Amino acid sequence: MASSKKQFIGVGILLIVLILLGLGAAWLVTRTKPSETPKVFYPEGYVPPQPGQYPVSPGETLEKRLEALEAAPTIRFLSIPQRVAAQQPFSVRFLVSVPSLEQPAKAQRATVHFGPISFGYLAPGELNEDSYPQEIAVAPEEEEISLPRAFSASITPSQEFAGTTLYMRAHVIIEGQDYWSGEISITVTP
């Protein structure tokens, strides 16, 4: 009788070990893949832009936007997709406007910067060309570009971005000064 109790306890322990091994294996299979959006701790109260949402500052009105157009060069996205497939090209368009008193202005460089982490909480003066890990030139660096002008960038997200959200900004250097658009986001599907 004592030996049957020992066998029963042994089988019970074996079942518990097998269940724990199964749970561990299931966890390994379903845990976060390296291609998914990394865990990032943003400043308190900051919410990254949602796919398809155009950047708008809190309290921004049409009148304030018009005043901004006359105060300094501005960069605004004109068309952005909400969702794109990995390894499939897509286009974004943006417009660089300059105050009428400064026209025609010349840009020395126009690029789109993007990556899987939002930097929308940073002011344009806090950004630099290394803020986002990827960069696409939309105009040759050797050429001076007359402004105002619309630009188009063709981007093909690599497979590593599948299942993530890409955050991006347009960047233009005008008369030696950096100007950045607001941040937009696009969902990348596998």
Image: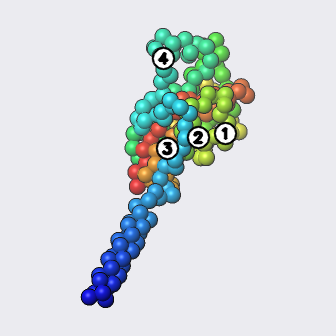
Q: Residue 100 placed where, x, y %?
A: 60, 13
Query: Of the residues under marks 1 and 2, which one precedes in the sequence?
Result: 2
Name the residue that disc number 2 marks.
Answer: 113
- Residue 166 shows which numbered tag? 3
Instruction: Report the residue at 65% width, 34% height from top.
Output: 127
What is the C-alpha distance between the residues marked 1 and 3?
16 Å
The answer to whether any part of residue 44 appears in the image is yes
Q: Residue 70 placed where, x, y %?
A: 58, 13
Q: Which amino acid does label 2 sit on?
A: His
Instruction: Report the residue at 57% width, 36% height from top.
Output: 119
Which of the 4 image quadrants contains residue 140? Answer: top right
Name the residue that disc number 4 marks.
Answer: 60
Label 3, residues with CA under 10 Å away: few <14, some 14-19, many ≥20: many
Instruction: Report the residue at 46% width, 44% height from top.
Output: 165
Is label 4 in a helix, a strand or a loop? Answer: loop
Quadrant assignment for the N terminus? bottom left
Query: Of the residues under marks 4 and 2, which one precedes in the sequence?
Result: 4
Query: Of the residues under marks 3 and 2, which one precedes in the sequence?
Result: 2
Label 2, residues with CA under 10 Å away: few <14, some 14-19, many ≥20: many
Which of the 4 image quadrants contains residue 42? Answer: top right
- Disc 1 and disc 2 in contact, CB within 8 angstroms: yes
| Vertical relation: 159 (above or below) 21 | above
Instruction: Report the residue at 40% width, 55% height from top.
Output: 190
| Vertical relation: 179 (above or below) 159 | above
